[in-house]
């Protein structure tokens, strides 16, 4: 249970817990998405602003739920900006727009960075196997 105000800054451990992501993933994403800019205080402690947390939620959704690759999410951010991700209107990225002359090309370009459902399931099975192996190794 989080007792902080919704507008309060969060530490990396709080964000990690709230998003169910390991801290190293958040640090890695900082290197891949320049839009994620936590404030760093003494000793390198990270403090995430509320908009950083919302952006991380959107990135996580695109990567984990919608099957985008990191490069695909980078392209979406470049073309549509972070406000679309923060507002959680992720469906707009895969729909074509009737008002845009190049909407067909945009839709095709973005879909090139998506995983097919079959590939995604295979990757999830491999990840489950790796987690089981890791647990076995940790027990020994």
Image (cartoon, rainbow, N blue to C red):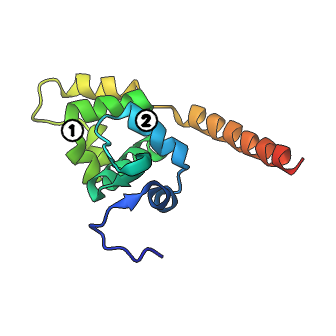
Q: Which residue is mark 1?
A: 81
Circle 2 packing at 10 Å, graded few (<14), some (14-19), many (20+), is: many
Circle 1 packing at 10 Å, graded few (<14), some (14-19), many (20+), is: few
Outermost residue to the front? 42
Q: Position of residue 64 (x, y in %)?
A: 49, 44
**Visible residue check, residue 107:** yes
* 13 and 83: which is toward the camera: 13
Q: Quadrant of residue 114?
A: top left
**Visible residue check, residue 67:** no
* 14 and 88: which is toward the camera: 14
Q: Nearer the viewer, mark 1 or mark 2?
A: 1
Give above or below for 3 relative to 123: below
Distance from label 1 to label 2 (Cα)? 16 Å
What kind of element bears circle 2? Answer: loop
Give above or below for 11 relative to 72: below
Q: Which residue is mark 2?
A: 68
Name the residue located 75 percent from the left edge and 41 percent from the top edge.
Answer: 129
Q: Quadrant of residue 93?
A: top left
Name the residue located 49 percent from the left edge and 55 percent from the top edge.
Answer: 16
* 118 and 62: which is toward the camera: 62
Q: Position of residue 123 (x, y in %)?
A: 63, 35
Q: Position of residue 112 (x, y in %)?
A: 40, 24
* 20 and 113: which is toward the camera: 20
> Is 63 situated left or right of 24 in this image?
left
Q: How many marks do you count on the picture?
A: 2
Name the residue located 56 percent from the left edge and 49 percent from the top edge.
Answer: 22
Label 1 vs 2, first from the N-terminus: 2
> Is 63 situated left or right of 137 in this image?
left
What kind of element bears circle 1? Answer: loop
Q: Position of residue 108 (x, y in %)?
A: 32, 24
């Amino acid at each position: 249970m989080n007792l902080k105000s919704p507008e309060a800054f969060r530490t990396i451990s709080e964000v990690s817990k709230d998003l169910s992501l390991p801290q190293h993933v958040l640090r890695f994403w900082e290197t891949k998405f320049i839009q994620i800019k936590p404030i760093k205080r003494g000793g390198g402690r990270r403090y995430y602003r509320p908009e950083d947390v919302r952006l991380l939620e959107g990135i996580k959704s695109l990567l984990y739920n919608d099957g985008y690759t990191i490069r695909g999410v980078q392209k979406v951010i470049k073309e549509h900006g972070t406000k679309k991700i923060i507002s959680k209107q992720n469906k707009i990225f895969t729909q074509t727009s009737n008002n845009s002359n190049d909407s067909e090309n945009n839709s095709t370009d973005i879909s090139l960075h998506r995983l097919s459902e079959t590939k995604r399931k295979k990757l999830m099975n491999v990840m489950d196997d790796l987690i089981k192996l890791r647990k076995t190794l940790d027990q020994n």
